[in-house]
Image (cartoon, rainbow, N blue to C red):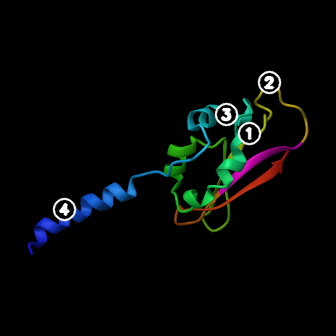
Amino acid sequence: MNLYRIIPFAFLIFIIACGKLPELENIDQKKWKNDKNGCLEYRIEVVEALLSQKEKLKGLSQNEMISLLGTADKHQLYERSQKFFIYYLEPNENCDQYSEGYIKALYIRFNSLDQAIDFNIQEVK
């Protein structure tokens, strides 16, 4: 068997397998991305559908997450080279319909190897 024929084929299979983002069911990704700071209140409607599919999202890199969900509303550095992406689920202070108090946000934690490892909703002020 000719090794020079196998290597390019294996490389092509690797590129195809690694380049595909997961399909998210019951979530309009365009609407999610357009709901900056939770101002349109679409994210709060579908966050449970997103969390029910978090196994599809675990292990994705920051760039892959941005491709899937858009740029996070806020980034937060954490200990040991970890990072959080924060997506506001309800209108925050940058929205016209913001009201004082706590609002919900989706926190996605990335480990030092740039892999999404945790997804949770927190209330923030």
Which region of the structure is painted magenta? 102-108
| x then y, percent, for residue 31 | 61, 32
* 64, 53: nearer the viewer: 53
Disc number at residue 96?
A: 2
Quarter containing the C terminus = top right
Give the mark, 1 or 3, whose residue is nearer the N terminus: 3
- Neighbour class for label 3 at 10 Å: few (<14), some, many (≥20)? many
Residue 106 among magenta residues = yes
- Neighbour class for label 2 at 10 Å: few (<14), some, many (≥20)? few
Q: Could you tell me which secondary element the residue under label 4 belongs to?
A: helix
| Horizontal side of residue 17 vs 101, given as left or right | left
Give the number of the mark in front: 4 or 3: 4
Question: Mark 1 is on which residue type?
Answer: Glu
Q: CA distance from mark 4 to mark 2?
A: 54 Å
Question: Mark 4 is on which residue type?
Answer: Pro
Give the mark, 4 or 2, whose residue is nearer the N terminus: 4
Q: CA distance from mark 1 to mark 4?
A: 45 Å
| x then y, percent, for residue 55 | 59, 61
Identified at 88% across, 32% down, the residue is 99
* Residue 69 in the image: above or below residue 91: below
Q: CA distance from mark 1 to mark 2?
A: 19 Å
